[in-house]
Image (tube, rainbow, N blue to C red):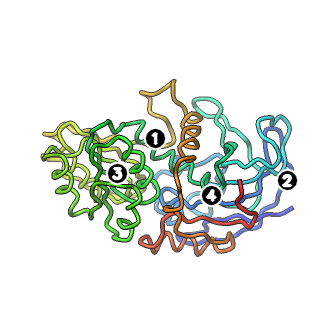
Amino acid sequence: MTARGVWFTGPRAIELRAEELRAPGEGEVRLEAVTSLISAGTEMNVYRGDIGSPEELVLPTSRGDFPFPVQYGYQVVARVAELGAGVDTLAVGDHVFAVHGHQDEFVMPVAVAGPTGRREIVTRVPEGVDPERAAFQNLLAVALNGLLDQPVRFGDVAMVSGLGVVGSFAALLARRTAGALVLVDPLPQRRERAAWIGADAVVAPEDAVEAVKSLSAGRGADVVVEASGAPRALQTAIQATGVEGTVVVLSYYGTREVPLVLSPEFHYGRQRIISSMVAAVGSGLQPRWDRARRTHVAFDLLRGIDVEPLVSHRLPFDAAAEAYRLVDETPAETLGVLLDYGRGSGA
């Protein structure tokens, strides 16, 4: 049997390569993709060739050699087609979320060994969560991770910079507790799309500091979530944050330089800037939280979130190159871009 998978063969160059399929071995499953979501963050950095240390980006299912050619992706929802020996947590026909590149059919392990123990990379989608909604589980987990690292407390003034999928999820979660919420994005189209979140102000970057001051009686933000991936946005985040406030960086900047002026706000304001890399749950939460619990909570949250406002495009898998081009070149028009494998999307 053969399948087709997306490979990055050079900066902004894609091929759909034929892949031989084998029967699943012990602890493995054969999966048939239903839908997959392109990540505008790390995945697009790899697509552009804009990566830092390659060893930091290697996934259990990535293949090839960085920077190119490489198969790299991590958000596929699929049906279980065949079980290997020893797999007793899944059944044929189950919908699952798989950490794998975009490919119409593939064999992969259900779990891999990691520094903190066994880690599932194939997770059954709970009943009542349809495949398109499930495709957003990972990006919701990125936002959730940030708010586990630095909660937005009741009454806090919060600001979220960057209204892509991750930033929109972070804003939606922050809205549940924030006393005031400011959303920031340079693209007017994204600011308009964010109306569903119900923020107190949705502004361009040049108006962010003033909007925060206005809603905080001049104190500045208690928490700022930087989810734009734009190096300049981190400077705005520092300027908008109040005394002993916290900037949570969800973005992965890759090889881009991030020049900052730290005085006076950072130094005199005793601010904290923390990384919230989704590859790990913060040490302050362990051992009560791990990746499995975070995944479970993300799926549970998705039951109550209508992801339709986050979907800008649905394209057939054959049009993968066009899908990446849209994400890369037309950010004002794109948000969540889903690839459809023609197998239906019913739960």
Where does the image place residue 332, in percent across and percent down from the top left? 41, 72
Numbered disc 4: secondary structure: helix
Amino acid type assigned to the residue bearing label 2 in the image: Arg
Q: CA distance from mark 2 to mark 3?
A: 43 Å
Which residue is disc 4 drawn over? 132
Q: Residue at x 58, y 75 (%)?
A: 322
Residue furthest top in the image? 287
Between marks 2 and 3 in the image, the one whose residue lies nearer the viewer = 3
Examine the rendered structure and indicate whether residue 228 appears above or below residue 290: below
Q: CA distance from mark 4 to mark 3?
A: 26 Å
Numbered disc 3: secondary structure: strand
Amino acid type assigned to the residue bearing label 4 in the image: Glu
Lower sequence index among marks 4 and 2: 2
Between marks 1 and 4 in the image, the one whose residue lies nearer the viewer = 4
Q: Residue at x 13, y 39 (%)?
A: 268
Where does the image place residue 260, in percent across and percent down from the top left? 23, 53
Which residue is disc 2 drawn over? 22
Q: CA distance from mark 3 to mark 1?
A: 13 Å
Between marks 4 and 3 in the image, the one whose residue lies nearer the viewer = 4
Which residue is disc 1 drawn over? 145
Where does the image place residue 304, in percent across and percent down from the top left? 53, 47
Q: CA distance from mark 1 to mark 2?
A: 36 Å
Examine the rendered structure and indicate whether residue 49 appears above or below residue 166: below
Between marks 4 and 2 in the image, the one whose residue lies nearer the viewer = 4
For disc 1, the neighbor class at 10 Å (few under 14, some 14 to 19, many from 20) is many
